Amino acid sequence: MREIGIGLVGGGYMGKAHAVALSAVGAVFDTALRPRLEMVTGSTPRSSETYRAAFGFARAASDWQALVGDPQVEAVVIASPQTTHRAIAEAAFALGKPVFCEKPLGASLEDAQAMVAAAEGAQAPNMVGFNYVRTPATQFVRQLLAEGAIGDVTWFRGEHTEDFFADPDTAHTWRCTGRANGCMGDLAPHMVNCALALMGPIDTLSAQIETVHATRPGTNGPLPVDNDDHGQMMVRFASGAMGHLYFSRIATGRKMGYAYEIHGTKGAIRFDQEDQNAVWLYRMDGPEATRGFSKILTGPAHPDYLPFCQGPGHGTGYQDQIIIEARDFLRAIETGQPVWPSFRDGLAVAQVIEAAFASAAEGRWHSVPTH
């Protein structure tokens, strides 16, 4: 095994998760490459030093440019706001350094296209962080679908619903400004990625996107909200299957509503991230009187479960999804082989989101470009 120096841009919610994952991934998966926490940077020199001390990095950088350019930083993990993703990734790729970038790939379709071009031009390992699709349960569902366990899939319903903005009296924050920070920029990419992973490409869609709470309390009175609270789209997959996707940050009572239901000619599947260690499977076998959904608890027989725990039903958690991502990123660097989801897969999500905005604005069905 050998070490690889990691530079982390951003130390907040996702930055901490990646720091913990990079510290644990070698022990969990016995990776050939072992991350060395070389350098971290935040929004200010003070926050950078705070993150360094808290997460165990060797050094704190004054800014992301210093981090990316440092020769001891051999790979870059981007966990900063999406408006910064493009510049950081392009600078890293210009030096031939592998990049892991949190979702969404960029703040716009143009950003995503430029980042893919930079990644592929550099021929450097690249990966985008859609962590929820990494659960052992959803990996198992992908296997079931590939094996034809429920026959030909005819319909898919997916949602990513949370309620952190359900109360109209919740204070105005940075999340209320800019399209990239709205629900379609923040939550929707996760479920779009899930739909593409499980069902394949989306051919056409019809979307509605709206702001429910037009203002939110500010220090000196109400402030305008200029992005969306929720959105929905009817979709037709390239396979011919129909589908419906819904995304909301105002879904009262929903905390982590990353959920889907899939119908096929021989069965059905249900999953809900709020119960992330269970898959509900219906097989159209046997007498009608004994048919029903079976709850399958994930365990060592399911993908990427055993390295965390030997006990069936004991369960994995949120942080474990990030550790699985870290393993895959290290494997891509080690082998030089593309890893899913790559930047190009992140671009596919951005293309769906862009088509949804166009559909909502024009009030008609809209084609999704192929990439």
Image (cartoon, rainbow, N blue to C red):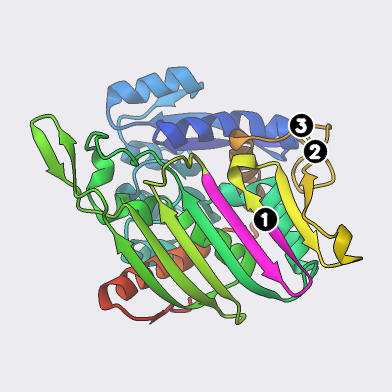
For image coordinates 37% across by 73% down, the residue present is 355
Q: Residue furthest left?
A: 220
Between the C-alphas of marks 1 and 2, the distance is 23 Å
Amino acid type for the residue under numbered disc 1: Arg
Foreground: disc 3 or disc 1: 1
Rendering coords of residue 49 (x, y %) = 36, 20
The first of marks 3 and 1 along the sequence is 1
The nearer-to-camera label among 3 and 2 is 3
Give the side of residue 367 with respect to residue 177, left or right.
right
Quarter of the image for residue 30 reads top right
Q: Which mark is residue 314?
A: 3
Q: Residues within 10 Å of mark 1 (few under 14, many from 20)?
A: some
Q: Residue furthest front?
A: 289
Identify the residue under disc 1: 270
Amino acid residing under circle 2: Leu
- Mark 2 nearby-residue class (10 Å; few <14, some 14–19, many ≥20): some
Q: Tag 3's secondary structure?
A: loop
Does the image show residue 96?
yes
In the rendered image, residue 258 lying in the magenta stretch gets the answer yes
In the image, the segment drawn in magenta is 257-270
Report crowding for label 3: few under 14, some 14 to 19, many 20 or more residues within 10 A (C-alpha): some
